[in-house]
Amino acid sequence: MSLLEIQDVTHTYATGSGRPVLHDVNLSTGEGEIVALVGESGCGKTTLGRLIAGLHEPSSGRISFDGTDIAGLRGNRRRQWRRKVQMVHQDPYGSLNPGLTIGSTLAPGILQHKLATWRTVQPEMIKLLQQVGLDATPAFLQRYPHQLSGGQRQRVSIARAISLQPSLIVADEVTSMLDVSMRVAILDLLLSFQRDRGIGYVFISHDFGVVRYFAQGGRIAVMFFGYIVEEGPVEELITSPRHPYTHMLLQAIPVPDPVLVRKRDEEGRDPERMIGEPATSGCVFANRCPLVQDVCRKQAPALTEIGTGHRSACHFSDEVPPLVHLTDDAA
Ligand SMILES: Nc1ncnc2c1ncn2[C@@H]1O[C@H](COP(=O)(O)OP(=O)(O)OP(=O)(O)O)[C@@H](O)[C@H]1O
């Protein structure tokens, strides 16, 4: 059974344009699994993450956790579900209350969920500091977020999430505001919790390099304007994309080799296609697609199984060309 199951979820913000920002999303993840959500800014990654973490309710569709529809959960069962799914945000400074010490940030959740008592909460918090690589002392618990570096603040956010012993963490662009030197350390820290505690992740990022590192062995779902257009095992999807949008994103990753850049351009990389409005009928990607044909303007392709655990929403997924920078003759 899946840990998390998202079925036909559509979401429209009451305060937004009135158009859905997620359309008929279907996605599932098993215990301890990593599923990465990738796509350009505004495609709905954070919205989907917030629905999974229960911070918004979907306009329609169903989200089940441990086999139970979360919309129907009440009382203690609802509290348990809220504890088991935690979210770590992109901006650790924004998500930590600047007026609270680290101790006052960590203690309430632990006490509320009865994971420690008033007597044991301090040693519990010190243990957490040590587990996330922070100075494990009572003095550190007295510090405020502004007294910490960006990396330390993100470690506090991670400590707050793991303090509630979750089964799933939604990690939303968790390294994008950190120095490059700090990024791998934070990713490795999160991976250690997957390895040692079986915590699964919904890992949101626009960076395929980061996703390839973090989600190895897991799956990627590629989103375009609120639709999942391709989903599959990480290595297979990154080396042999079967949707023209995934192909375009991967082909746009900068390479430091001018010969390769020329070869990509000769083979049809068209910067003009990197921008453009989503189509309002037929395939949502039709206005940008290099493979577009008449049928794409008329009929939206379903997300269809094209290999084991690999799905693509394209009428012409067989015609997506190999990536230039990964073919032998490009070397
Ligand atoms: N609270 C909100 N009210 C109204 N519209 C919103 C709200 N939050 C997001 N949106 C809109 O929903 C769409 C999807 O936004 P979302 O933040 O989920 O995308 P994203 O892929 O995570 O982008 P980014 O990588 O820039 O965070 C965007 O058009 C955005 O403007």
Image (cartoon, grey):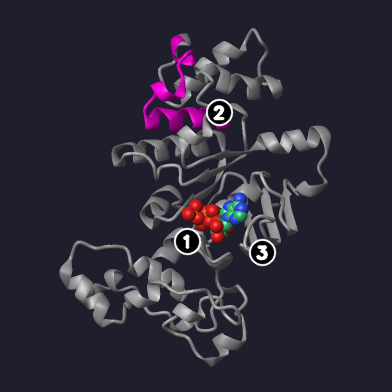
Of pointers 3 and 2, the one earlier in the residue sequence? 3
Q: Is residue 300 above or below residue 87?
A: below
Under mark 2, the amino acid is Arg
Residue at the extreme bottom: 294
Under mark 1, the amino acid is Gly
Q: Which residue is labeled 3 in the image?
A: 18
As rendered, which of 184 and 288 lies closer to the eye? Answer: 288
Q: CA distance from mark 1 to mark 3?
A: 22 Å
Q: Which residue is labeled 1 in the image?
A: 39
Q: Nearer the viewer, mark 1 or mark 3?
A: 3
Under mark 3, the amino acid is Gly
Mark 2 Cβ and ligand 1 under 8 Å apart: no
Secondary element at tag 2: helix
At horizontal 54% and vertical 79% (from top left) the residue drawn is 314
Q: Is residue 245 above or below residue 184?
A: below
Of pointers 1 and 3, the one earlier in the residue sequence? 3
At horizontal 69% and vertical 54% (from top left) the residue drawn is 5
Using the rendered image of the protein, determine whether residue 44 is visible from the camera's viewpoint: no
